[in-house]
């Protein structure tokens, strides 16, 4: 593999750390440490991708990663998030609280799945060269996973605070997914 500038190493490191956290999040009850790590990592990931300064000529058309793998990951994350009672103890019981919990689980699982899929794609491209991976991360960030990253940051903060996150202005990614 070619020499890698500092910004690229930081992006690669954040992408690997994020993917490892997701890959190893499969048992309810590991929430406190996992959430703390994820809450620290998401802003770090955001800064890392923004700091990339590669010139990407001829931007490629964005394509969604493998739907079967993506859906399997989404279902796994959704199950673990929904089954983790410690994670949701601040939300209490009751019909409205359960609906709120389900919405948060669905949104968070969807956001984390999409960020993971796009980061993993860039990591896989590192074998072809740093420039390809960086261009994939930049392109997919601005076209797709950047909004999911922002949403995930809001959702994780809301879960930790025991409330519902405010809707983010300007983009409804669930409507986007339903139309694409």
Image (spheres, grey):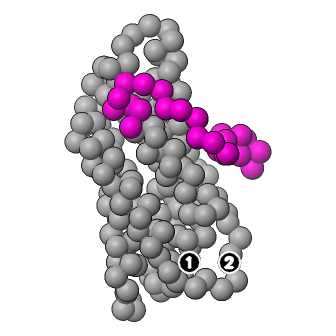
Compared across the picture, whether 61 is left or right of 122 comes to: right
* Residue 48 visible in the shown view: yes
Q: Furthest-right residue in view?
A: 179
**Magenta stretch encompasses residue 165:** yes
Q: Which residues are magenta?
A: 157-180
Give the image location of residue 134, x and y in percent.
Answer: 50, 77
Q: Position of residue 145 (x, y in %)?
A: 56, 56
User: Camera-side residue: 148 or 168?
Assistant: 168
Answer left or right for 112 relative to 173.
left
Q: Reading the chain from its start, which is encountered first: label 1 or label 2?
A: 2
Q: Residue furthest top?
A: 94
Q: Which residue is mark 1?
A: 135
Residue identifier under label 2: 59
The residue lying at 34 percent from left, 82 percent from top is 6
The residue most toward the bottom is 2
**Mark 2 nearby-residue class (10 Å; few <14, some 14–19, many ≥20):** few
Kindly state the secondary structure of the residue where label 2 is placed. loop
Q: Is residue 88 left or right of residue 169?
A: left
Q: For residue 43, what is the image quadrant?
A: bottom left
Q: Nearer the viewer, residue 3 or 168?
A: 168
Q: Position of residue 111 (x, y in %)?
A: 52, 46
Residue 119 within the segment the image draws in magenta: no
Whether residue 30 is situated above or below residue 87 in the rendered picture: below
Residue at figure coordinates x 50%, y 49% from the top left: 150
Residue placed most toward the observer, 166 or 1: 166
Circle 1 — which element?
helix
Q: Position of residue 105 (x, y in %)?
A: 47, 32
Question: Is mark 1 in CB contact (under 8 Å) with mark 2?
Answer: yes
């Amino acid at each position: 593999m070619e020499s890698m500038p500092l910004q690229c190493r930081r992006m690669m490191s954040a992408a690997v750390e994020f993917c490892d956290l997701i890959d190893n999040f499969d048992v309810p009850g590991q929430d406190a440490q996992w959430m703390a790590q994820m809450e620290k990592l998401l802003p770090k990931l955001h800064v890392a991708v923004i700091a990339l300064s590669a010139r990407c000529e001829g931007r490629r058309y964005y394509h969604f990663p493998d739907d079967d793998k993506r859906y399997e990951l989404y279902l796994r994350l959704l199950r673990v998030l929904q089954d983790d009672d410690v994670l949701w103890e601040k939300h209490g019981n009751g019909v409205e609280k359960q609906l709120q919990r389900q919405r948060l689980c669905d949104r968070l699982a969807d956001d984390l799945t999409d960020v993971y899929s796009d980061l993993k794609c860039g990591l896989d491209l590192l074998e072809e060269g740093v420039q390809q991976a960086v261009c994939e991360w930049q392109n997919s960030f601005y076209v797709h996973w950047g909004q999911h990253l922002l949403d995930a940051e809001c959702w994780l903060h809301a879960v930790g605070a025991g409330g519902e996150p405010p809707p983010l202005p300007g983009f409804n990614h669930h409507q986007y997914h339903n139309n694409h």
